[in-house]
Amino acid sequence: MSDTERLFPDNAGLDRAAELLRSGELVAFPTETVYGLGGNATDDRAVGGIFAAKGRPSFNPLIVHVPDIDAALAIAEFDVGAERLADAFWPGALTLVLPLRAEAGIAPLVTAGLPTIALRVPDHPVARALLQRAGCPVAAPSANPSGRISPTTADHVLAGLGGRIAAVLDGGACPVGVESTIVGTYPQPTLLRPGGLPAEAIEACLGAPLAAHGGGISAPGQMASHYAPDSPIRLNVTDARPGERLLGFGPMESDLNLSPSGDLTEAAANLFRHLHALDATAAPIAVAPIPEHGLGRAINDRLRRAAAPRD
């Protein structure tokens, strides 16, 4: 493939990106969570290209992005709980895993052979404008080589996938900074992956606690080793060893700090950007403790997977 185009979110850039998606090419684009690597979810060749560009294992399903709930209803079967969550949190950082409609025309690789599909309506003006113009459901995992640090800027995308994809639509930095929360609603509401929407908000909406995921790959982002830098990571420490770089949280001395004030929203937005920066130093990374509530659950999930033994 020739060099990856950098497009900008004006009319010309959006039209070009939509044209590329309709023709089966891959386009990275910003969402409020991270940059996604988009391909037409009804095009077998495009979906296969996503797996090839990322080096992603074929048993790991993809999230399909659509512009509105009507488009989602044409693809999946919604129960009462799913409808309630979609009404409350779409557009937003919530992905719902729902039974796939047989007539939806989704490429089989998208669901990795599962009878369910992961759907999201993103809350980012560039993403929504692109989805409207493309006129097709867009499968879009994070726009990075499989298992590596997720991208929150167009430069991150180009560093990992430059030359492997047709274009990146540069919409600046992603404001949330961690991937969407994934919930399955059948047979009971279950947290499949913590993310940019706190689980507490979902439980408040449903009026019931979310069940814990029972194991196995039933949604994206569940592999044990994921989001990983090249450098090794040591978690829940307050002092770096000689040669380590310390990623701090709260008021403390550190090489980089997710949030000096201890704000979890700020910490989530900075997580992958700071990991990219520390990884560029080629030094081992030590990470301060992060509270295990709200967005801290998503941050800790990403850090645990980043620190897990590599395959």
Image (cartoon, rainbow, N blue to C red):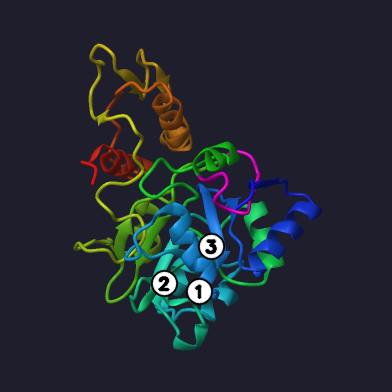
Judged from this view, the residue extending furthest toward the right is 12
Q: Is residue 91 visible?
A: no
In the image: residue 161, left or right of residue 241: right
Please name the residue that numbered disc 1 is placed on. Answer: 44
Is 62 drawn above or below residue 234 in the view shown?
below
- Secondary structure, magenta segment, majority class: loop
Marks 1/3: CA distance? 27 Å
Q: Which of marks 2 and 3 is nearer the N terminus?
A: 3
Q: Can residue 203 be seen in this view?
A: yes
Marks 2/3: CA distance? 25 Å
Judged from this view, the residue extending furthest toward the front is 1
Q: Which label was assigned to residue 109?
A: 2
Q: Residue at x 71, y 64 (%)?
A: 19
Q: Which of the two discs, 1 and 3, sits closer to the camera?
A: 1
Residue 167 located within the stretch drawn in magenta: yes
Element under label 1? helix
Q: Which of marks 1 and 3 is nearer the N terminus?
A: 1
Q: Viewer-proximal residue, 115 or 260?
A: 115
Element under label 2? helix
| Kind of residue at badge 2 | Leu
Q: Which label was assigned to residue 241?
A: none
Stretch of the chain drawn in magenta? 161-174
In the image: residue 168, left or right of residue 296: right
Q: Residue at x 44, y 29 (%)?
A: 274
Q: How many labels does the image show?
A: 3
Q: Which residue is drawn at 52% across and 82% down?
A: 105
Q: Earlier in the sequence, mark 2 or mark 1?
A: 1
Please name the residue that numbered disc 3 is placed on. Answer: 90
In the image: residue 299, left or right of residue 41: left
